Image (cartoon, rainbow, N blue to C red):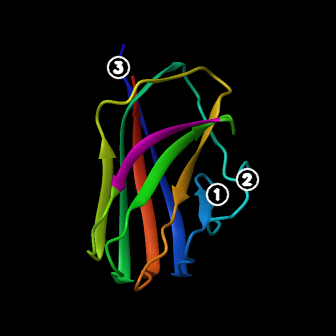
Amino acid sequence: GLGYAIQIECPNQATTTDGQTIYWGSKNLAQQTSADIHRIYIPKAGTIKVAYFHYHAATAGTGENWSINIRKNNSADTLVQTLALANAHRVWSNAALSIAVVVGDYIEIKEVCPTWATNPANVRRSGIIYIE
């Protein structure tokens, strides 16, 4: 009856692009503008309950709305959080998620980038998803 966690990371993104939607997840590969490449497969049925995503940027950038979603099976997006911070460290979190998953489902992380006055640069991404 215990839950489990999936930890994910994405290599450094040297330059963020205004108004871009990007995807990342399971591969040691930079984020992509096309979905369905970074599949994180679900090994055991349950419900995604909690997600935390930490970004560190060498250049913080300005604080426009930046949204993070969990995309399930390349069809359904669930918003984790939208932040408007101008910090080098940003943490998107949601401890009230309820995304049912079964063995063989997959997820990706979907970002919707704003148009920044000053773009974040050298962004490193990591996250953890808890399934119960």
**Of 53 and 5, which appears nearest the observer?**
53
Q: Amino acid at mark 1?
A: Lys
Secondary structure that dominates the magenta span = strand
**Of 19 and 59, which appears nearest the observer?**
19
Mark 2 crowd level (few <14, some 14–19, many ≥20, 10 Å Cα) = some
The image quarter containing residue 54 is bottom left
Mark 1 crowd level (few <14, some 14–19, many ≥20, 10 Å Cα) = some
Q: Amino acid at mark 3?
A: Leu
Which residue does the image show at 61% across and 57% down from the upper left? Answer: 23
Dot 1 lies on which element? loop
Task: Tell me: residue 91, above or below residue 39.
Answer: below
The image quarter containing residue 96 is top left
> Is residue 16 on the magenta stretch?
no
- The spot of residue 10 in percent (x, y) is 53, 64
Q: Amino acid at mark 2?
A: Ile
Q: Which residues are magenta?
A: 76-82
- The spot of residue 74 in percent (x, y) is 69, 39
Q: Say whether marks 2 and 1 touch (CB < 8 Å).
A: yes
Q: Can you identify the residue that label 2 sits on?
A: 37
Dot 3 lies on which element? loop
Q: Can you identify the residue that label 3 sits on?
A: 2
Which residue does the image show at 48% across and 68% down from the upper left? Answer: 114
